[in-house]
Amino acid sequence: MLRSRRTPTHADPLDAQRTGLPADRFRHPADPGHRWVRRLLGAMIWIVGCMALFALYLRISFTAHVSSDGANNALQAWDMLHGHLLLPGWIIGDATYYTLDLPVLAVTEIFFGLGDLTSHVAAALTYLIVTVSAVALALTDSRGLARVARCGVVVAVMTALLHVESNTPYLLGAPDHAGTSAFLLVSFLLIDRAPARWYTSPLLCAILCAGQIGDATIRYVAVPAVVVVCGYRAVAARKVRTGDAVNALAAAASVPLASAVRAVMLHFGAYQMIAPKTAISPPSQWPQNAALAWHAIRVLFGAQAASGSPALARDAGYILGIACLLAVAAGFARVVWSWRTASRAEQLLCAAIVINLSAYVISTMPIPSNPYEVIAILPCGAVLAARACVPGHIAGTLWDRAAVGLVAIGALLPLIAVAAGPPAASPTAPLSAWLKAHGLTYGLAGYWNSSVVTLQSGNQVQVRAVVMDGRQVIRYDWETSTSWFDASRHDATFLITDLTGNGLSPSAESYFGKPAKIEHVAHWAILIYPKNLLEQVAIAGTGP
């Protein structure tokens, strides 16, 4: 009978005893070239995966059309790209997205110019950044197949709501808090991976400061989460001079720092902001707000049944959403149950979810159509679900590999199905094409028929938003630039009214006087004047 021959590739204690030599003498050093090849191959796999995910995100983003909200963000980025970094003269809404979404838009515009495509590409890139940040948090303490499985769970949870057709704009539409989650996730990743390095606290302060300049969500969710969790860990350690204590102080310091940076920006002529319309609601309203918060949770995790879709697609998407929500609940419960031994990242994610939902419930913000106000719970929940459902190490047996393959298929197939949907037609495309064909280059319209036309025409037809205020037409001071209404620089010769009532009322004609010509495109009336309409536009502040 033949005996199996042991290969000398690993140290053998018996051989060491026989020869009297250390076992290390029998180890062959790893081939550096082979190690680098494996690392390069692994990096290429992740890069290809990111490219595929970006392609799916981009295709899905086309299933929703760009509105004037997204168009105004693109125009702000266009101004930044052309040297107006502080956006002087702009009046922006209560969230500016100045430190992530707008720079991504500006970079995208370098390659694609100003147009609908730019907005779709930037939306896909921004959500890819959020997804990669969540995956990086989920992969901590995992290797091999476990990394692939955790990545699949994160992607599945973070895209579950896309199976409801009307939900696409929440993730892949105009900037609306989704990109803000990147600041939250990156700050948590920094604290988890390098809790006590010399650079951690100043870098953490800078990240949180930048996030607050773009969106107050960081101030009211991420900063309190860091202060609470790091403060708790410092107290539990019974030490004052710890990395956790310093990180808590750095997070707290980011609030006055952000205010100081904003003051300096204003001193040098930066954009103005509309004050957020938020307040504490009466306690009697909180139960109803809690119900709305539960509705928002179901929408964000795809556990809200879609209406108007084919039965099979609707039911399959709903089942997947329920599964994702249950996985998130399991991840959250796991961390709460083992709170003392949970990692910093897990504690921070749970704290962020609780703080975000609590602030939402006691505020005046809850309405059925604004689940994006708590959208930060989506990536946080995805990370918790991945860490709860997938162990840090998977043995690599046939069954294990099959399970990982099923997770990957479960994450990608639904996305591919959503991406196969038809692209959405822009309602204002005929209007934009007609204005461009007839050489009308500067005019006025209601908000939803203004900047979107400018974007679609590549800035060749510039339409500015106005609104009726009593009997007069005034500048609409929301996501607008005051320079657009300077009559010495621009000559507005046409007015667009909407005959369906979803734009500027036809009664605006009585304010500007009888036009020289009236043309009709679909449900719009284009009133053409032989004068500069900007000279009659009144200036007054108004909200959205």
Image (cartoon, rainbow, N blue to C red):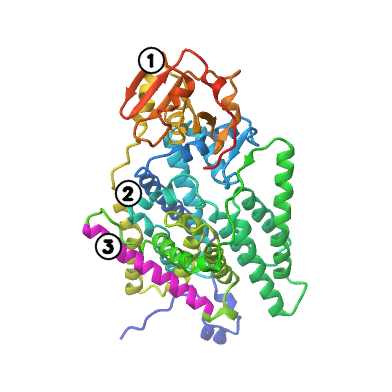
Query: Residue at 32% of width from left, 73% of height from top?
Result: 398
Q: Which residues are magenta?
A: 311-336
How far apart in space, not on screen, are marks 3 and 1 (Cα)? 54 Å
Q: Residue at x 48, y 21 (%)?
A: 512
Q: Residues within 10 Å of mark 1 (few under 14, many from 20)?
A: few
**Closer to the camera in the image, 415 or 285:** 285
* Residue 200 sits in quarter: bottom right
Secondary structure beneath dot 2 equals: helix
Q: Is residue 265 above or below residue 316?
A: above
Name the residue at the right extreme: 241
Query: Residue 341 location in percent, x, y?
Result: 58, 80
Report which residue position mark 1 lands on: 517
Main secondary structure found in the magenta portion? helix
Distance from disc 2 to disc 3, alpha carbons, whole Å, reads 16 Å
Give the SS element for disc 3: helix
Magenta stretch encompasses residue 106: no
